[in-house]
Structure formats: C-alpha cells, structure tokens
Amino acid sequence: MSEEKNISIHGQWSSRWSFILAATGSAVGLGNIWKFPYITGEYGGGAFVIVYLICVALIGIPIMMAEVMLGRRGRQSPINTMRALAKEEGRHGIWSWIGWMGVLAGFLILSYYAVIAGWALAYVFRVGSGVIQASDSAGVQAIFSELVSDPEKLLAWHTLFMVLTMVVVARGVKQGLEKAVRLLMPLLLILLLVLVGYAMNTGHFNDAIDFLFKPDFSKLTGGAILTAMGHAFFTLSLGMGAIMIYGSYLPANASIAQTSIIISVADTLVALLAGLAIFPVVFSFPDLTPGAGPGLIFQTLPLAFANMPAGTIFGTLFFILIVVAAWTSSISLIEPAVAWLIENRGMTRVSAAVWAGLATWLVGIATVLSFSHWAFDFNFLGAVKHNGVFDILDILTANIMLPLGGLFIAVFAGWMMKRKHSKEELALNHSYRLWWFLIRYVAPVLVLVIILNLFGLI
Ligand code: TRP
C-alpha cells in the first residue's frame, strides 16, 4: 500500500513525539505496575530482575527497532505489512504469519488484560469510598478475595473496561489518545514517586532494595528465566505487531533508534519504581508475602494509602491512573486485528471494533472464572500457579507466543531483509553495526536458547 493510502485509511501521528507518547502509552501498563511486581515476587527478586533487564537491553530494544522499522516500511496492518515486505525482499509469503500469530496473541492477551484492568476499575471505587483505608492487612486481603471470587462482579467490571477500550478504538487510535497520554503519563510518574517517597519511610525500604537488586542466582530456575524474557516482550509490547502498527503511522523522518530507546527506558523506569513502591509495604506487614501472586498490588497498595496523609485522594487517583495506563495499552493489543478487518474485510472502523471487542470479551469470561469456579492449581517449571485458564493464557502468550513472534521478526529484519533496506530505514551511522549484530545473532540466539532449554532440548 502506498504511504498516501495508508495515511488516508488510518491517519498518521502528528509528530515523532506523538508516536513516542502513544508507544509509551502502549508499553506502560498493567505489565509494569501489576505484573512486574508479582512475578518478581514469585521468582524471588534480584536474579529475576537482572535477567529481565538484560533481556530488555539485548533483545527488547533491537527488536523494538526492527518492529518500528518494518511497520514504517510496510505501512499497513502487521499481516499485510509482512506480506508486502516479504514480497519486496523476494521472500515467501509465509512471513505474513508473523502478523497472524500477532493478531491471535494480542487478542488472547487482551482477553485477560481487560479482566485485570476491571479489578483496577473496581478499586477506584473501593479506595475512593474509604472502605479499604479502614482495614488492616487481613481486611484488605478479604476485600480482594471477595471481589475476585465473585464472577458476576468481575464480569461487570470486565465489560465496562472492554467498552471503554472499544470506544477509543472505534474512534480511531490517534484521536484522543495523544492528549490523554500527554497529560496522564507524567501524572502517573509523579504519583509513583509519591508512593516511593512513602515507601522510603516504612522502615523496610532497604529490604526492598536488597530484594530487587541483590541477586540470588540459586533462585534462577528455567521458569524464572523464561518468564523474565517473556516479560521483557510483554512490558515493551513487542512480538505481536502492536509497535509495528504504531510504527506504520510514524512520519518518515523520525529516528527509530532514539525513539525506541526513550520508550524502553521510560517503561523500565516505571516498572522499577512500581517495585520500589510495593515491596517496602510487603515487607512491613508480616502476613504479606512477595509471592502472593496476581493480587499483590491490590493487597499492598491500599495499605500504603491507608497509612499516608490524604491517602484516599492519592489512592483513588492512583487506581484511576492504573486504569488509564491499562487503557492506552489495551487499545494497542486489538489495533492490529481491527486494522486488518478494515483493510481486508472492508469493514468500517466502528463495526471492526465492535466485532473484535465482542470476541475478546467472550474469551475474557474464561479469565473471569479462573479466580473462582474454574480455578485450579498446576505446576509450571517449579512455580505453582493457582488460576487455571488465566495462568495458561498468560504463559502461552507472554512466555511463548511473544518471544516466538519476536524471534521471527528478528530473523526477518536481520536475515531476510537486504542490509541496504534496513540501513536506509534506520538511518544510523556507526551504531547500525551494533543493531545488526544484535538483531542477527544475539537476540534470536538468546530467545532460541531460552525456549529450547525450556523443552529440555538443550
Ligand atoms: N505492554 C503493556 C503492559 O505492560 C501490555 C501490552 C500492550 C502488550 N500491547 C501489547 C503486550 C502488545 C504484548 C504485546 O501492560
């Protein structure tokens, strides 16, 4: 598709900054504030964090550059972009499967993501009404279990969040998104700093620093390494075409390397701040444990807010910001599917959004039930998981589909594409060689080794 045609169908970012804001909006979400702390807790801290940081630097950043580059060159939904680029490079059409797998992964992720975002939505009202501030840690845990074990309530919040998401998608991702992100992302950062400030005074800040940054490599199981790598993909929104499609709306003259680094650093910073805000609270209540699982932030943050001045206001605002962060992420999870429905099925944006949203909502019910009727335990590489279908969906998408998608993207960008093309698109001087080395050898080999190791193949 020509650049003009793509722009007339989907529009374009008004500047490089809009792209950075939107991509940061996609990257910063529940992954940073909800998932990073709880998986770090489950996998024992320090060593897990180091593997995650290494994966962000050596796999995440080069693959983000590759995704943005492919998107900007193809200028369509990921499926059609990969088809067009494969053709341009004289490669087999099978490469468009990267796009198909991405659409499926995004769809499955959103199905559970929207349920968790629904929890955050529920907490806006719970914290806002002051119920939670009145309780101690046992009370806070009881309120959480009461919410998640009631599928009807969860379904209502899940539905509300899906509607919010699809309204934005139906109106076109670029309208409204830019403004929301520009205002709310800095606010999120400020509130996180307020929380970290509070956490410093709990008397357990050093314990949290030790937990997060002092590696105990004996805790580094195969499951921990795989989860850390999967999380690097998840938190940066990589491996399924979300960043690719945002890149397809990027003006031609923007620097891909610089923008990718800004986005990745901002994303990592938010995750580490979330960790620094949450773990001191965990360590100051004897009945809270780092390995509490998906409920971790819902059982800790309310306690922090209960004990700080103006906690109700800060707490309510913070959960609103979590919802907004989840919102700007969820629209990018479904955008590749919606763009494809518009391009290939001739749907209007509104009906594409309605159909994609309905399908995701329906699959989300499996996650809604995973915390009550459909809950079951299973063992995943040494970690015990309690929430059946939800955990399976999460492991399948974040730990397997995204890294595989990323692997294929790296192989395409590094091996299938002519050097001249990637060089022209990235417009780098000396650092091009570094990217080229990372995307051709380091990233694919690391992903492959970690996955093969999982299946006991090496
Ligand atoms: N990165 C987001 C988060 O951390 C989630 C997300 C949005 C995502 N788009 C994605 C994850 C695409 C994987 C792929 O919350």
Image (tube, helix red, strand yellow):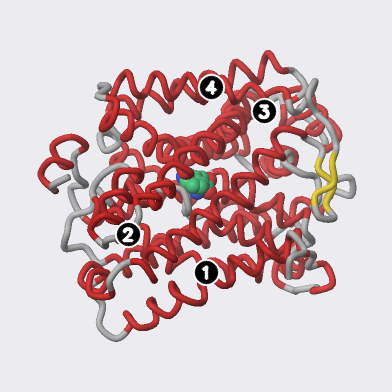
Q: Which mark is residue 444?
A: 1
Q: Quadrant of residue 410?
A: bottom left
In whole angstroms, how far apart are the C-alphas of marks 1 and 2?
Answer: 19 Å
In whole angstroms, how far apart are the C-alphas of marks 2 and 4?
Answer: 36 Å
Is residue 306 at all visible to an observer of this figure?
no
Mark 3 belongs to which amino acid? Answer: Thr
Residue 347 as seen in the image, left or right of residue 125: left
Q: Which of pointers 1 and 2 lies earlier in the amino acid sequence? A: 2
Residue farthest to the right, as pictured: 286
Q: Which residue is mark 2?
A: 91
Is residue 169 at all visible to an observer of this figure?
yes
Mark 1 belongs to which amino acid? Answer: Pro
In whole angstroms, how far apart are the C-alphas of marks 3 and 1?
Answer: 32 Å
Helix, strand or loop at label 3? It is helix
Q: Which residue is mark 3?
A: 367
| Mark 4 C-beta to ligand 1 under 8 Å | no
